[in-house]
Image (cartoon, rainbow, N blue to C red):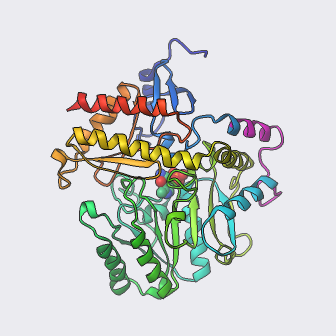
Amino acid sequence: MHRDPQASNAALMARRHAAVPRGVGQAHQLFIARGRNAEMWDVEGKRYIDFAGGIAVLNTGHCHPAVIEAVKAQLDLYTHTCFQVIAYEPYVELAERLNALAPGRFPKKTLFLSTGAEAVENAVKIARAHTRRGGIIAFTGGYHGRTLMTLGLTGKVAPYKSGFGPFPGEIFHAQFPNPLHGVSVDDALASVESILKNDIEADRVAAFILEPVQGEGGFYIAPPEFVEGLKRIADRHDILLIADEVQTGAGRTGTWFACEQWPVAPDLIATAKSLAGGFPISGVVGRADVMDAPAPGGLGGTYAGSPIGCAAGLAVLKAFEDERLLEKSRALGQRLIDKLRQLASRHRCIGDVRGLGAMVAIELFEDGDPARPDADLTRRITAEAAHRGLILLSCGTYGNVIRVLVPLTASDAIVDEGLAILADTLDAVR
Ligand code: PMP
């Protein structure tokens, strides 16, 4: 590989700080030169194992050969028409595929967009158009994006919402169930009922929106009995259920959509990230009658459902079949859980190891006490691990969770090498 011998992370970081606003945070002070599957090399030639996956975008790894090949073939045909001007088959085919994959025994339709936030925004628009109601109930600790509506839905102030209000009205936050931090399923359902009693009439609420596993919020899993209870309330009042699967989707949790593991089907699903293996496309998949509520012209966007993204998405779906990546997701999840539990037995600071499929995290506490989340230790671990060649990402309302989003295509050897670096890091930072 050709590499500029003068290139340095520090010099590029200095240029970055001078040219790019500080509001765009950065977890690691590094610049990438090349990525392949679960490995990356920085501009100084140092190798890293990637447990961050570009925040859940690289379930099929960096530059999956079949995805790259499909994109290159698409580049030679056409790159853009705007689907609202001249249509193209890959959009329709990807919609058909997702309609077939989404749970629920009802006809489905799919709309494509570009980003996760845009998918969530459109799910809300569609839910409002269908119900002719304005209210949306989201959950504490939820993360839905950085646009003003999705920030309004997001259930964590710092750093996302600080200074950016006011947000759109008619958004309320119920408690997300989190027994580890003192919120039971009953508490969470009671908080929904309390909003319907104290804040907004049920017949003015269009939808509930939740993540099957909270991503930025800390990899807390919505228990099936909570989803069931929420759906009961929804059905009683004709309120729709939106699953924000931007982080959980595309096979991360062991099924294509995490909500396939729910006891009930959502009305709408927002999807993005790993759907196209590193290319920007997102979508809303949902009940056909709901999806058809907005009038022609009400939905879309210049780049929405770009041909490149559609071609990449179809290649990702094929890779899932060819390489049996859903099975791999479940096996990888079990491997991660087993090995992280072994680590937890040696390190009191790891107070919880949890996961759904390969969406796995550890939560760190001072002396293992859930009342004392250890964000400082979390920061020291992610920094030291990077120094040792492992890219980790933290998350969580308390900043004390380390999440694993390693590509599902990673070999066992690479996963074990990454986990060994994590084990050494834990020994080193104590
Ligand atoms: N919803 C969830 C659950 C997410 O995890 C994210 C991104 N982290 C988003 C929405 C927003 O996606 P994007 O950054 O592509 O707009």
Viewed as shown, does residue 62 lie left or right of 17?
right
The image shows residue 14, relative to residue 364, as above or below, that is above
- Image quadrant holding the C terminus, namely top left
Can residue 392 be seen here?
yes
Image spot of residue 388 (x, y percent)? 36, 25
User: Is residue 170 in view from this perspective?
Assistant: no
* The one of 47 and 331 positioned closer to us in this rendering: 331
Prevailing secondary structure of the magenta residues: loop
Q: Is residue 78 magenta?
A: yes
What residue is rendered at 52% in x and 53% in y?
254
Nearer the observer, 363 or 216:
363
Decide which of 166, 190 is in the foreground and name it: 190
Is residue 115 shown in magenta? no
Q: In the visual, does 378 lie left or right of 224?
A: left
Residue 25 drawn at (x, y percent): 41, 41
Which residue does the image show at 44% across and 75% down from the upper left?
228
Q: Position of residue 78 (x, y in %)?
A: 82, 44
Picture layout, residue 37 above or below residue 79:
above
Q: Quadrant of the N terminus?
A: top right
Residue 74: image quadrant is: top right
Q: Position of residue 40 (x, y in %)?
A: 51, 28
Q: Residue at x 38, y 29 (%)?
A: 386
Which residue is located at x 49 percent, y 53 percent? 253
Number of marks in the rendered image:
0
**What stretch of residues is rendered in magenta?**
68-88
